[in-house]
Image (tube, rainbow, N blue to C red):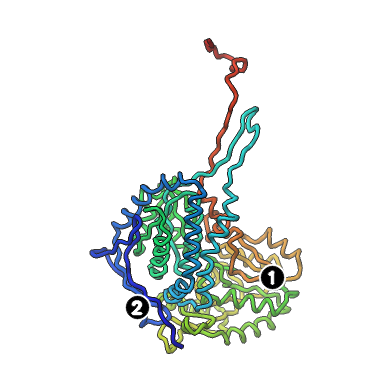
């Protein structure tokens, strides 16, 4: 299959309305497609001083942007939506080359960009609508308004390099904030293309800025004095580091969307076909590289053998390959991810879990970071097991058995993460129990753990986040609620408080 590639050329960092190439930088990295190690997407030099320049530009642009009427900011975003929609094919291909995602999956992400603008402008914005409270105090009206925060640093992940940063950027912009966006160094081409579309949309200079860089660049950005908020999606370890690096920056809002070790519970009355299909999607879509992916499956013993056998047979048949072949699974993101995935196979075996399906590196015609799915049977639940509690971020599933729903809930809650749980059962009472007992931010009934709606909040508990849900609720952490008391009445001398003697003439 021959695929025509869109041309990608390094353009530089996008600062104050224009691309600024790095000539003498602090380093560089090569953006090599994980699906084909012969595909050098682009070479990216980076310069830490550009972070300072971008933050200054965003700070200088902030007041004018924040004072624009909401309708004018809305028009800029509608223009951006047209560009997102009109360039979806190109965006999808760049996502595929940067991440290795199959074309169908990358196109889903590309189409979500314009949809996020629609949902934000038509629904989420209602969460920050002005509210008037008659007689908030006797004969005094109250008003609740939501004002913007300032400069927001958006630090993006590699697994959804366009959609997840966009989920922070759009609500931040419509609320009146300005942006400095640092993409993952694994996916710089996607970040650059987003900046190109912002350039075409002709936002005012400095409202949206992009800087490429390594981990040190991210640290410099989040700690910058002009940054008022940090909107991050990524691993627990990096989120914790951001928290530590900004510990004394108490005025900065932190919205940390972090990892997951998500569980699916399949009870004895479940629709078996649906449970198997949905769990395959949950476990292996994006090659397991989703914070909401299914890592653990807890089966009722009555259906455990049937489910496991059918799940195993279906997992063996999943197609794996280059993004242009439109397979189900692409590669992992880099060599380190493959090494970690293989290492966790060994850890699972060492911790007395049975290897039903071994995960291994694949040698395909396109040399890339391809691996096979894997399944381990957990003989005994152990909350201290490294394998049972660690986020692997690869296509691995641990299968447990339990006929006690309280014990199943204990397993669900045992890892410290608390993003998503799925329950497959026709019994609504079990679902209602789970709504109370599961320490998660998302609970799905007869649906897989992954794939979320932008019309709902998205955020977890414990190590999965810091109580700043994104998606529909993102606009809330992009604003500060402001209270006003408004008293239109003239001064009434009869209401002077006791002990005050005013000479009223």
Residue 93: % across, % down: 45, 75
Which secondary structure, mark 1?
Answer: loop
Residue 425: % across, % down: 73, 71
Between 479 and 194, the one lying in front of the other is: 194
Between 39 and 432, the one lying in front of the other is: 39
Which secondary structure, mark 2?
Answer: strand
Q: Which residue is mark 2?
A: 40
Residue 165: % across, % down: 47, 62
Q: Residue furthest left?
A: 24
Relative to 505, residue 336 above or below: below
73 on left or right of 9: right
Relative to 469, residue 158 above or below: below
Residue 1 showing in the rendered view: yes
Label placed on residue 446: 1
Residue 130: % across, % down: 58, 43
In space, the residues marked 1 and 2 are separated at their CA atoms by 42 Å
Write down the quadrant of residue 442 in the picture: bottom right
Relative to 141, residue 152 above or below: below
Residue at horizontal 41 percent and vertical 66 percent from the top: 191
Residue at horizontal 39 percent and vertical 50 percent from the top: 227
């Amino acid at each position: 299959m021959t695929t025509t590639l869109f041309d990608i050329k390094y353009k530089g960092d996008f600062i104050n309305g224009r691309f600024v190439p790095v000539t003498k930088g602090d380093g560089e990295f090569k953006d090599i497609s994980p699906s084909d190690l012969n595909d050098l997407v682009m070479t990216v030099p980076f310069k830490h001083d550009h972070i300072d320049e971008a933050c200054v530009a965003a700070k200088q642009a902030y007041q004018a942007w924040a004072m624009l009427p909401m309708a004018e900011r809305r028009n800029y975003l509608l223009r951006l939506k047209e560009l997102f929609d009109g360039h979806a094919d190109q965006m999808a291909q760049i996502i595929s080359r940067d991440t290795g995602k199959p074309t169908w999956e990358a196109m889903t992400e590309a189409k979500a960009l314009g949809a996020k603008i629609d949902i934000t402008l038509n629904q989420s914005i209602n969460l920050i609508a002005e509210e008037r409270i008659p007689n908030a105090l006797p004969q005094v009206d109250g008003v609740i308004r939501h004002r913007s925060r300032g400069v927001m640093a958006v630090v993006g992940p590699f697994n959804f390099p366009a959609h997840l940063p966009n989920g922070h950027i759009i609500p931040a912009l419509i609320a009146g904030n300005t942006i400095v966006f640092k993409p993952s160094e694994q996916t710089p081409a996607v970040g650059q293309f987003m900046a190109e579309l912002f350039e075409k949309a002709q936002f005012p200079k400095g409202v949206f800025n992009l800087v490429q860089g390594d981990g040190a660049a991210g640290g410099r950005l989040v700690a910058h004095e002009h940054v008022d908020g940090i909107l991050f999606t990524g691993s627990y370890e990096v989120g914790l580091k951001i928290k530590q690096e900004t510990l004394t920056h108490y005025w900065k809002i932190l919205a940390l969307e972090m990892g997951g070790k998500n569980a699916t519970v399949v009870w004895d009355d479940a629709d078996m076909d649906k449970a198997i299909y949905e769990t395959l999607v949950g476990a292996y879509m994006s090659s397991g590289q989703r914070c909401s992916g299914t890592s653990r499956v807890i089966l009722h013993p009555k259906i455990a053998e049937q489910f496991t056998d059918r799940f195993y047979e279906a997992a063996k048949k999943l197609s794996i390959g280059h993004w242009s072949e439109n397979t189900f699974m692409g590669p992992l993101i880099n060599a380190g991810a493959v090494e970690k995935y293989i290492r966790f196979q060994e850890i699972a075996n060492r911790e007395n879990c049975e290897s039903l399906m071994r995960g291994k590196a694949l040698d395909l015609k396109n040399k890339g970071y391809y691996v096979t799915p894997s399944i381990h049977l957990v003989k005994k639940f152990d909350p201290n097991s490294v394998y049972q509690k660690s986020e692997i971020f690869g296509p691995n599933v641990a299968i447990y058995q339990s006929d006690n729903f309280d014990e199943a809930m204990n397993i669900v809650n045992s890892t410290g993460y608390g993003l998503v749980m799925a329950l497959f059962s026709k019994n609504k009472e079990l679902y209602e129990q789970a709504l109370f007992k599961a320490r998660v931010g998302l609970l799905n009934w007869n649906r897989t753990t992954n794939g979320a709606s932008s019309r709902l909040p998205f955020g977890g508990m414990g190590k999965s986040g810091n109580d700043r849900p994104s998606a529909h609720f993102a606009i809330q952490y992009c604003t500060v609620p402001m209270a006003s008391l408004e008293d239109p009445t003239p001064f009434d001398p009869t209401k002077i408080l006791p002990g005050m003697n005013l000479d009223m003439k």
